[in-house]
Image (cartoon, helix red, strand yellow):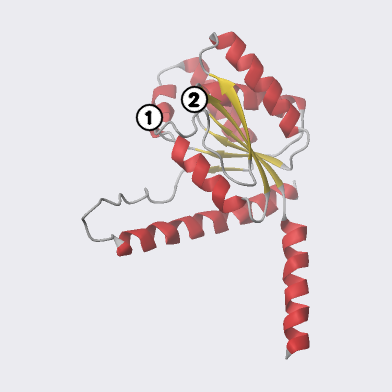
């Protein structure tokens, strides 16, 4: 029985090693900012880092919240737009050439750099539509809409369904156990789907 468990343990370790990937997460927002896709990006990194090497590239004018085991590259938001885009593109390029894939959030400030990087490299792209207001605004701007559509066409997969929002825990109120369980289950299913997509991307 012990030998069987040892073999299973070694097999699982080998499997994790073989499926581990270097993932670059390109996002326009990151905590302490609260608007989507900021909290999603942080939670995703926390849930991917045990099986993958994760680097986040984000715009922020504040100190980004740390995630142990995750590298976070912050591009200052107060710079003029052309400089912001240039710095973000350079930072993303340096990460992308060492990564197995780019997981990008929607939003023109990220989509344009990711599009440029995709034209310069062969790194697979997985796109997530987490910022629905930005997605809707893109439809009213032909240039931004073109960038988003082009990037979607270049992506291995475009994700439109995201996990549940994290339930609020209020003092002096009963713990919302059922909502927390549903939240964690939705994330487990989401990450499971992403891992399958990542495997497909690695075969491209």
Tell me the residue at 65%/15% (across/down). Answer: 86
Q: Horizontal and vertical percent for residue 37?
A: 46, 36
Instruction: Specify the quadrant that holds the N terminus.
Output: bottom right
Mark 2 lies on a secondary structure that is: loop
Q: Horizontal and vertical percent for residue 138?
A: 44, 23
Q: Which mark is residue 62?
A: 2
Q: Is residue 110 left or right of residue 38?
A: right
Q: Residue furthest left?
A: 172
Tell me the residue at 44%/62% (across/down). Answer: 185
Q: Nearer the viewer, residue 88 or 202?
A: 88
Marks 2/1: CA–CA distance: 23 Å
Q: Nearer the viewer, residue 154 or 71?
A: 71
Is disc 1 surrounded by few (<14), some (14 to 19) or many (20+) residues within 10 Å?
A: few
Tell me the residue at 64%/27% (across/down). Answer: 114
Q: Which residue is mark 1?
A: 133
Mark 1 lies on a secondary structure that is: helix
Disc number lying in front (2 or 1): 2
Task: Name which quarter of the figure residue 120 lies in.
Answer: top right
Q: Which mark is residue 80?
A: none
Nearer-N-terminus badge (2/1): 2
Q: Residue furthest bottom?
A: 1
């Amino acid at each position: 029985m012990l030998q069987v468990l040892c073999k299973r343990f070694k097999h699982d370790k080998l499997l994790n090693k073989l499926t581990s990937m270097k993932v670059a997460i390109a996002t326009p927002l990151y905590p302490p900012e609260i608007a989507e896709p900021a909290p999603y990006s942080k939670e995703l990194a926390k849930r991917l880092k045990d099986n993958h090497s994760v680097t986040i590239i984000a715009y922020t004018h504040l100190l980004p919240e740390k995630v142990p085991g995750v590298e976070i590259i912050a591009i200052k938001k107060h710079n003029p737009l052309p400089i912001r885009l240039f710095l973000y593109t350079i930072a993303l390029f340096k990460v992308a050439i060492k990564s197995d894939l780019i997981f990008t959030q929607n939003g023109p400030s990220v989509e344009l750099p990711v599009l440029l990087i995709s034209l310069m490299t062969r790194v697979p792209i997985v796109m997530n539509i987490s910022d629905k207001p930005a997605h809707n605004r893109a439809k009213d701007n032909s240039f931004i809409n073109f960038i988003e559509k082009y990037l979607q066409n270049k992506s291995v997969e475009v994700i439109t369904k995201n996990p549940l929002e994290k339930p609020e825990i209020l003092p002096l109120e009963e713990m919302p156990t059922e909502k927390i369980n549903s939240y964690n289950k939705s994330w487990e299913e989401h990450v499971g789907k992403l891992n399958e997509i990542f495997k497909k991307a690695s075969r491209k």
